C-alpha cells in the first residue's frame, strides 16, 4: 500500500527533553516580548512583537505539533494555510494603503 | 461547534477502533496509513481555523491603523500582568498536552492521566483569569454597546495617558469589540477543547490510548496547540500596542 | 402574404423600441463601444474556433467514419500555442480596459461640480448655484461635469447607460464620476446596486440641454441661495466661526483658501485638503488634526445631514478671505435666532440638528447682511 | 446514431445479488450510513429537491419580468424571490452539486479505496447541509429574506427587517458542510490511493475535485467569519461594517468576495472534471495533454484566490488594486481556455459517439466558452464600468453556472447513472432533454447580454418598456429550459425500475469505477486493486476485456 503513498514515513516519537527545551524557550520569548513592549522603539515595537510571536508559533508547530518530523506534504499543507492567510491580509491591506481617498 | 464535531468524530472513530482489536477501520490498509490520514485531516481542519480567525485579524489590522490612538489607549487599559500570566499558563498547558502525547506513545497510562489532568487544570485556570479580565471590563464600562463609557479615554486618570477627543474615544469601541470577538472566539475553542479533554481523560482512565493506537490523542494535541498558537498572536496584538514606559 | 395590420403594428412597435446599443450621448461612449466591438470580435473568433473544432471533429471522426481511435499523448507545441494566443489577447484587453478605466474615472481639473446624495429610494442632486433636484439631473452638453456623490444610508450605484458611466455611491465617503454629454436629450438614470424594497423605483432622468437652455433652467429653478451661502449660514449656526475665525489666536486653523492646499498634520504626514478630507475632519476631527492645534474640536457625526456637509464643504471651498467669517461672527446669533424661530416648521427640532438651506428673499448673493433674514425652508430639500 | 453502449444480454442479465443498495434495508440504514455511495444518494435527492425549489423561484422571476410593470408580485416579494433563488441555487445546489453527489460516489472508487477517509465526517457534512437547508427553509417560510444573496452591508445589517440572521446562519452551517466534504476529498486523494495509483494516473475528475476542495477548505471559513460579523452587527451593532461608527462597509465586500469569488471555481471545477471523463470516454481517446488539463485545474484554484476584488472595480478600490486584480483576472482566464482547447483536441482522431452525456458535454463546451469570454469583458476594467450590475453580468454567470456547471452536472449524473443504479436511463428521451436544455438556455440568457449592454440593471422589479422584447424572449426561453429540466425528473425515476440492466461497464470506460460491478458492493473492492496502467488507457481496457481478466470484485 504505502509503496504508492509518497507521504508515508517513520513515525517519530519526540522525547520530553525536546519538549522541555521548547517550553523554556517559549517562556523566555514571552518574557522578552512583554519586556520589549515597554521599550520605546517606535515603528519597531509591533515588528518585534509580531516577530517574536511568529518565532513562538514556529517553535510550537515544528516541535509540539511534530511538523519538524513529518513529511514534505504536511509542511507544504501548513505552509499553504498561512500563505492563504497572508494573501488575504496583504492584498486587502494593499488596497487600503493605496487608496487616494479615505483614511489612508 | 465545528471543532467539536470533528474532534468527537475522532473520538467515535477511536471507540470504533477499540471494537477492532487491530484498531483498524475497514477502509484502511495499514495502521500507519490510518494515523497519517487522521492527522492530515486534522491539519486541514486547522487550516480552516486559521482562515476563520483570519477574517478577524484582517478587521483588527485595518482598524488598528485607522484609529491607532484609540487602540493604544484601549490596549493600555488591559491588565498586562494577567495577560502575560495567561500566556504562560497556556504555553504550559501546551507542554503538558505534548507530554500527554508522549506518555501515550510510550504506553505510560499514569503519565497520560497526569498530563491530561494538568492540561485540563491549566485550561480552566486560563478561562478563570480570562473571566476576571472580562469582569474588569464590565466594571469599567468598556463593554462596547449602550453601556460603553468613553470617560476613561477622554479624561484619563493615569497621567501618562494622552486624553482622546470624544470622536476618537468612540472608536475604542471597535477595539473592544474586536478584543471580545477574538478572545471570545478563542475562549470558545478552549471550552470545546476542555470538554473533549474530559472525554479523553475518561477513556484513558479505562485504559485507552496506551495500546499503541494514539492518533486521537495526537490529533487532539494538534488542536490544543493550535489554540495556543492563536493566543500567541492575540497576546501581542491586543495587549502590547505601545505600552507606557515603566517610570 | 398578408399580415394582419394589428400584428404588424405590434411587431413594428416592438422592433422600433428594441435596440442593440444604448445611444452614444457622451464623449466617452464611442471609446467604450469601440472596445466592446473589439471584445465581441475576439469572442466571435474564439467561439467559431471552438465550434469548428468540435463539429468538424465530430463529423470527421464519428464512429462510423473512424471506428478505431488513434491514441495521442498531447502536443506541447499546440498547447503552448493556445496558451500564448489567448494570453496575448487577454493582455490586450487588460491594457485597453485599464486605459479606458482611467479615462473614465480620473476627473478633469476644471469640470463643473454637482453633488449627488443617494438615499432609499431617490437621487438628490445639488447644483452649486443652489438648484435642488430629485430623481432628475439637468446638465449642459459639451461641458465636463463632475459628480461628487455620497449615500446617506446603503450602497447605491449611479448609472447612466447612455453615457457609459457608473459608480458606486457609498455611505460615509465621497465617490466621484465625470462625463461630458455630447447630445441633448433625456436619458435613463438607474440605481444599479440593489438597495432594498424600491430599488427598481430608484430611477430618474438625465436632461442634457444646450448651455443656453441650461442657463435658463438654472436661473429659473434656483432656490435662491447657493450651496456656499447655505454653508455659510450653517457654519455660523453651528458656531464653527467661533474657533475657525481666521484670527491668529484662533483655536481652530484658518480655513481661508485651505481647499486644495497641502496640510501638515499633527502626526507629521501631509494631506491635500479635498472634499473627502474636509468632510472627514468635520465628522471625525481628531483622526486628522492639523499640526499646531489641539484635538479639541467636537464631532458633528449625526448632527449635520449629508446635504449640510455638502453645503459646508462647498462653503469652505469658496472661502477666500476671513472677512465674511468675522462678519458672520456678529450675525450668527441672528441667524441661529431666526433658525430657532423657524424651528416650528415641521421636521426641524433644533437649529444645529437639522439645518435647511434657507431661501433668501433678495436675489442670489447672500452675504452677511442678507444671511440674517431667512424664510422657512424649501420643501423638497428636506433631509431626514 | 452509433453508440458504444455494451449492455449485457437483456434476457439473461441480472442485477448483482449483493450491492450497496441492498446490503442493508430500512431508513435507519440510510440515515446512519457511513457508506460514501449511500451518502452520495442522500445528497442527490436533497440537492435535486432544492434545485427545483430554486428553479420555481427563477420561473416566478421570469414571469414577473414578462411585462415592464410591477404587476405580478409586490416589490418586496420580488426581492425575496431573487434572493432565495440565489441563496438556494448557490449554497444548496451548485456548491455541493457535483462534488457531494457524483464526487462522493466515484472519487473513492477512482482512487481505489474502500471509502472516503472519514466516513462519519462525510455523513456529518450531509447532516450539516440539511441543518443549513432547514434554517434557510425556515427563513423562507417565515417571510423570506431580501438582502440579495450577497448580504451586502449596511443594507443587510441596518436597513432590512427580514430574516437575515436565520438565513446567514443557514449559509454558515451549509458552509461547514462543504468544508468537511473538501477536507475529506483532499485527505482521500492524498492518503487513500491504491498501490500503483500515482498522481498522474488519477482520473482528471479527481484532479479537478482536488483543486475545488482546496478552495472549499481555505475559502469557506472566511465567509463563515464574515457572516458571523454580519449577524453580530445586526444583533448588537458592533460597528465593524457601519460607517457611522467608524467601520468600513468595503471591508465586508473584501471579506465576502474573498470567499465568494473562489466559490465560483468551487462550483465550476468539478464540472470540468466531469467533462474530461465524458469527452475521453465517448471519443475512446486519452484526454489530449493530460498534464496540462490537470495542472490548469490547480492553476485555476491557486489564481482563484487572487482575483476577488474584480467584483469591486466600481466601488472605489484603489487604482493600484484595480490594475493588479484585473491583470490576475486575465491570467485566471487562460487555464480555462487551455482546458477548452484540450477537450476539443481530444476529439481529434477519436472514434466519437453521441450518447447523452456527450451531448451535455458539447453543450458545456459551447456555453462555457461564451461564459468565459464574457468574463473577459467584465474583467477588463473599462468595460466593467458599463457592464457590471446589469443583466450582462447576470447572463455571464448564468452561462458559466447554469450553462456550464448544470450541463456538466447532468452529464455526470447521466454518465454515472448506470454505475449508481445498475440500470440505463432511456437514451432517446435523455438526448431530447439535452437538446431542449441547450436551446432553451440560449434563448433564455443570450438576450440578457443585449439587454445588459442596453443598461438594464439587475434585480429590477420593473423596467423601462423598451427592454420588453428581449425580456419576453428570455422568459419564453425559460419555459423551454424548464421543460428540459423536468424531463430527467420524469425518466430518471422511471429508469430505476424499468431501465435496461447496465452491466459493469456499459460505456467501456477505463476508470476503476467501471471495472467493478454496478451497482458496486458496499466496500467497493473485495481486495484493494493494483493500478497497473495509465489513466484513459483504452488499449489496456481492450486487452482486459479480451482476456476477461477482472482485477476487482
Image (cartoon, coloured by chain):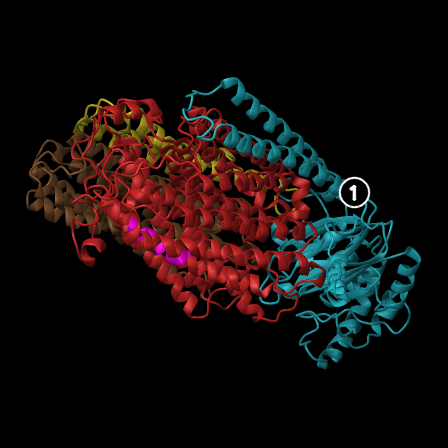
Chain colours: A yellow, B brown, C cyan, D red
Q: Quadrant of residue B22?
A: top left
As for residue C276 lying within the magenta part, the answer is: no
Q: Residue furthest right?
A: C212
Query: Split into 4 quadrants, where in the image is the C terminus of chain B?
Result: top left
Total count of labels: 1
Left or right of residue D544, residue D341 in this image: right
Q: Nearer the viewer, residue C352 or A83?
A: A83
Q: Is residue B45 visible?
A: no
Badge 1 crowding class, 10 Å Cα cut-off, few under 14, some 14 to 19, many 20 or more, is some
The answer to whether C258 appears left or right of D535 in the picture is: right
Image coordinates for residue B112, horizontal then vertical, percent: 12, 39
- Residue D187 point in image, percent of width and height: 29, 36
Q: Chain of mark 1?
A: C
Q: Which residue is mark 1?
A: C30
Image side of residue C283 versus residue B215, left or right: right
Answer whether residue D42 is magenta in the image: yes
For mark 1, give the secondary structure.
Answer: helix
Segment colored magenta: D41-51
Image position, residue D517 (x, y; %): 23, 38
Amino acid at each position: 500500500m504505502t509503496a504508492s503513498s509518497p507521504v508515508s514515513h517513520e513515525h517519530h516519537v519526540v522525547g520530553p527533553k525536546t519538549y522541555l527545551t521548547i517550553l523554556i524557550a517559549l517562556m523566555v520569548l514571552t518574557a522578552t516580548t512583554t519586556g520589549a513592549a515597554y521599550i520605546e522603539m517606535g515603528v519597531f515595537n509591533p515588528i518585534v512583537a509580531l516577530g517574536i510571536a511568529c518565532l513562538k508559533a514556529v517553535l510550537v508547530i515544528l516541535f509540539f505539533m511534530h511538523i519538524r518530523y513529518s513529511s514534505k506534504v504536511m509542511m507544504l499543507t501548513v505552509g499553504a494555510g498561512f500563505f492563504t492567510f497572508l494573501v488575504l491580509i496583504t492584498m486587502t491591506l494593499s488596497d487600503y494603503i493605496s487608496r487616494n481617498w479615505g483614511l489612508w | 461547534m465545528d471543532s467539536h464535531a470533528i474532534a468527537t468524530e475522532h473520538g467515535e472513530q477511536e471507540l470504533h477502533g477499540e471494537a477492532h482489536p487491530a484498531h483498524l477501520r475497514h477502509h484502511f490498509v495499514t495502521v500507519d496509513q490510518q494515523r497519517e490520514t487522521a492527522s492530515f485531516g486534522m491539519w486541514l481542519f486547522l487550516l480552516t481555523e486559521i482562515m476563520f480567525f483570519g477574517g478577524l485579524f484582517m478587521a483588527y489590522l485595518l482598524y488598528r491603523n485607522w484609529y491607532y490612538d484609540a487602540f493604544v489607549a484601549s490596549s493600555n487599559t488591559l491588565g498586562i500582568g494577567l495577560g502575560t500570566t495567561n500566556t504562560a499558563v497556556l504555553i504550559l498547558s501546551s507542554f503538558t498536552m505534548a507530554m500527554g502525547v508522549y506518555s501515550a506513545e510510550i504506553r505510560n497510562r499514569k503519565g497520560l492521566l497526569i498530563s491530561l489532568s494538568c492540561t485540563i487544570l491549566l485550561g480552566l485556570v486560563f478561562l478563570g483569569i480570562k473571566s476576571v479580565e472580562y469582569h474588569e471590563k464590565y466594571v469599567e464600562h468598556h463593554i462596547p454597546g449602550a453601556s460603553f463609557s468613553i470617560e476613561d479615554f477622554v479624561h484619563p486618570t493615569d497621567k501618562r495617558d494622552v486624553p482622546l477627543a470624544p470622536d476618537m474615544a468612540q472608536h475604542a469601541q471597535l477595539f473592544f469589540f474586536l478584543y471580545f470577538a477574538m478572545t471570545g472566539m478563542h475562549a470558545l475553542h478552549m471550552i470545546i477543547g476542555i470538554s473533549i479533554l474530559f472525554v479523553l481523560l475518561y477513556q484513558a482512565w479505562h485504559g485507552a490510548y496506551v495500546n499503541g493506537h494514539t492518533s486521537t490523542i495526537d490529533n487532539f494535541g494538534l488542536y490544543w496547540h493550535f489554540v495556543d498558537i492563536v493566543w500567541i498572536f492575540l497576546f501581542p496584538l491586543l495587549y502590547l500596542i505601545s505600552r507606557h514606559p515603566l517610570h | 402574404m398578408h399580415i394582419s395590420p394589428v400584428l404588424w403594428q405590434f411587431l413594428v412597435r416592438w422592433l422600433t423600441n428594441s435596440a442593440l446599443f444604448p445611444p452614444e450621448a457622451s464623449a466617452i461612449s464611442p471609446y467604450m463601444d469601440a472596445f466592446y466591438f473589439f471584445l465581441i470580435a475576439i469572442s466571435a473568433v474564439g467561439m467559431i474556433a471552438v465550434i469548428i473544432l468540435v463539429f468538424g471533429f465530430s463529423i470527421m471522426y464519428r464512429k462510423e467514419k473512424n471506428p478505431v481511435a488513434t491514441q495521442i499523448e498531447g502536443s506541447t507545441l499546440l498547447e503552448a500555442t493556445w496558451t500564448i494566443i489567448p494570453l496575448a489577447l487577454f493582455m490586450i484587453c487588460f491594457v485597453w480596459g485599464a486605459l479606458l478605466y482611467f479615462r473614465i474615472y480620473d476627473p478633469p481639473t476644471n469640470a463643473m461640480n454637482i453633488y449627488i446624495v443617494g438615499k432609499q429610494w431617490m437621487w438628490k442632486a445639488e447644483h452649486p448655484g443652489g438648484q435642488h433636484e430629485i430623481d432628475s439631473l439637468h446638465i449642459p452638453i459639451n461641458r465636463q461635469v463632475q459628480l461628487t456623490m455620497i449615500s446617506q444610508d446603503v450602497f447605491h450605484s449611479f448609472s447612466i447607460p447612455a453615457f457609459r458611466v457608473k459608480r458606486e455611491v457609498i455611505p460615509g465617503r465621497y465617490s466621484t464620476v465625470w462625463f461630458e454629454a455630447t447630445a441633448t436629450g433625456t436619458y435613463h438614470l438607474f440605481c444599479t446596486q440593489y438597495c432594498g424594497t424600491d430599488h427598481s423605483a430608484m430611477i430618474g432622468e438625465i436632461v442634457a440641454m444646450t448651455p443656453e437652455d441650461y442657463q435658463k433652467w438654472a436661473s429659473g429653478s434656483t432656490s435662491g441661495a447657493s450651496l456656499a451661502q447655505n454653508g455659510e449660514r450653517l457654519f455660523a449656526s453651528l458656531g464653527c466661526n467661533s474657533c475657525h475665525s481666521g484670527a491668529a489666536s484662533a483655536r481652530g486653523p484658518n480655513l481661508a483658501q485651505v481647499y486644495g492646499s497641502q496640510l501638515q498634520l499633527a502626526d507629521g504626514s501631509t494631506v491635500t485638503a479635498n472634499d473627502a478630507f474636509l468632510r472627514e475632519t468635520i465628522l471625525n476631527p481628531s483622526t486628522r488634526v492639523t499640526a499646531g492645534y489641539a484635538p479639541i474640536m467636537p464631532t458633528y457625526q449625526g448632527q449635520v445631514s449629508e446635504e449640510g456637509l455638502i453645503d459646508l464643504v462647498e462653503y469652505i471651498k469658496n472661502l477666500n478671505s476671513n472677512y465674511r467669517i468675522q462678519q458672520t461672527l456678529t450675525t450668527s446669533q441672528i441667524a441661529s435666532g431666526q433658525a430657532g424661530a423657524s424651528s416650528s416648521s415641521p421636521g426641524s427640532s433644533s437649529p444645529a440638528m437639522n439645518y435647511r438651506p434657507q431661501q433668501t428673499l433678495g436675489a442670489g448673493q447672500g452675504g452677511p447682511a442678507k444671511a440674517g433674514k431667512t424664510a422657512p425652508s424649501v420643501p423638497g430639500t428636506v433631509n431626514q | 446514431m452509433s453508440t458504444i453502449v455494451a449492455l449485457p444480454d437483456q434476457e439473461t442479465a441480472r442485477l448483482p445479488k449483493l450491492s450497496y443498495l441492498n446490503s442493508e434495508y430500512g431508513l435507519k440504514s440510510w440515515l446512519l450510513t457511513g457508506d460514501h455511495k449511500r451518502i452520495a444518494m442522500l445528497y442527490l435527492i436533497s440537492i435535486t429537491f432544492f434545485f427545483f425549489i430554486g428553479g420555481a423561484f427563477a420561473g416566478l422571476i421570469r414571469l414577473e419580468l414578462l411585462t415592464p410593470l410591477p404587476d405580478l408580485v409586490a416589490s418586496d416579494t420580488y426581492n425575496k424571490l431573487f434572493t432565495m433563488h440565489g441563496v438556494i441555487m448557490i449554497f444548496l445546489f451548485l456548491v455541493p452539486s457535483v462534488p457531494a453527489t457524483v464526487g462522493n460516489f466515484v472519487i473513492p472508487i477512482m482512487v481505489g479505496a474502500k471509502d472516503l477517509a472519514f466516513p462519519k465526517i462525510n455523513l456529518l457534512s450531509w447532516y450539516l447541509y440539511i441543518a443549513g437547508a432547514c434554517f434557510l427553509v425556515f427563513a423562507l417560510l417565515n417571510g423570506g429574506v431580501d438582502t440579495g444573496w450577497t448580504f451586502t452591508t449596511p443594507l443587510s445589517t441596518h436597513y432590512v427587517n427580514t430574516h437575515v440572521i436565520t438565513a446567514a446562519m443557514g449559509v454558515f452551517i451549509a458552509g461547514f458542510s462543504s468544508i468537511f466534504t473538501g477536507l475529506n476529498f483532499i485527505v482521500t486523494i492524498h492518503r487513500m490511493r491504491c498501490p500503483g495509483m500515482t498522481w498522474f494516473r488519477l482520473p482528471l475528475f479527481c484532479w479537478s475535485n482536488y483543486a475545488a476542495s482546496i478552495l472549499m477548505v481555505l475559502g469557506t471559513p472566511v465567509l463563515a467569519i464574515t457572516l458571523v460579523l454580519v449577524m453580530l452587527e445586526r444583533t448588537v451593532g458592533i460597528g465593524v461594517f457601519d460607517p457611522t461608527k467608524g467601520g468600513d462597509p468595503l471591508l465586508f465586500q473584501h471579506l465576502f468576495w474573498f470567499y465568494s469569488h473562489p466559490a465560483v471555481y468551487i462550483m465550476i471545477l468539478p464540472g470540468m472534471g466531469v467533462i474530461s471523463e465524458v469527452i475521453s470516454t465517448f471519443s475512446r481517446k486519452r484526454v489530449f495533454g493530460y498534464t496540462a488539463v490537470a495542472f490548469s485545474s490547480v492553476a485555476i484554484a491557486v489564481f482563484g484566490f487572487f482575483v476577488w476584488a474584480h467584483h469591486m472595480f466600481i466601488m472605489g478600490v484603489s487604482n493600484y488594486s484595480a490594475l493588479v486584480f484585473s491583470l490576475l483576472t486575465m491570467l485566471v482566464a487562460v487555464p480555462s481556455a487551455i482546458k477548452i482547447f484540450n477537450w476539443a483536441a481530444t476529439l481529434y482522431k477519436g472514434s466519437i459517439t453521441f450518447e447523452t452525456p456527450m451531448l451535455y458535454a458539447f453543450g458545456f463546451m459551447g456555453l462555457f466558452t461564451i461564459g468565459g469570454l464574457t468574463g473577459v469583458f467584465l474583467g477588463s476594467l473599462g468595460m466593467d464600468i458599463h457592464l457590471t450590475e446589469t443583466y450582462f453580468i447576470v447572463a455571464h454567470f448564468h452561462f458559466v453556472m447554469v450553462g456550464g456547471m448544470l450541463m456538466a452536472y447532468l452529464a455526470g449524473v447521466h454518465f454515472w447513472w448506470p454505475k449508481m443504479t445498475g440500470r440505463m436511463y432511456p437514451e432517446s428521451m435523455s438526448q431530447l432533454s439535452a437538446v431542449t436544455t441547450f436551446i432553451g438556455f440560449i434563448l433564455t440568457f443570450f438576450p440578457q447580454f443585449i439587454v445588459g449592454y442596453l443598461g438594464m440593471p439587475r434585480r429590477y422589479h420593473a423596467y423601462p418598456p423598451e427592454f420588453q422584447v428581449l425580456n419576453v424572449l428570455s422568459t419564453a426561453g425559460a419555459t423551454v429550459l424548464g421543460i428540459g429540466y423536468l424531463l430527467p425528473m420524469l425518466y430518471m425515476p422511471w429508469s430505476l425500475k424499468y431501465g435496461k440492466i447496465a452491466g459493469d461497464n456499459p460505456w467501456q470506460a477505463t476508470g476503476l469505477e467501471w471495472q467493478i460491478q454496478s451497482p458496486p458492493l458496499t466496500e467497493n473492492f473485495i481486495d484493494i486493486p493494483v493500478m497497473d496502467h495509465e489513466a484513459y488507457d483504452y488499449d489496456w481496457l481492450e486487452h482486459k476485456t479480451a482476456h476477461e481478466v477482472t482485477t476487482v470484485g
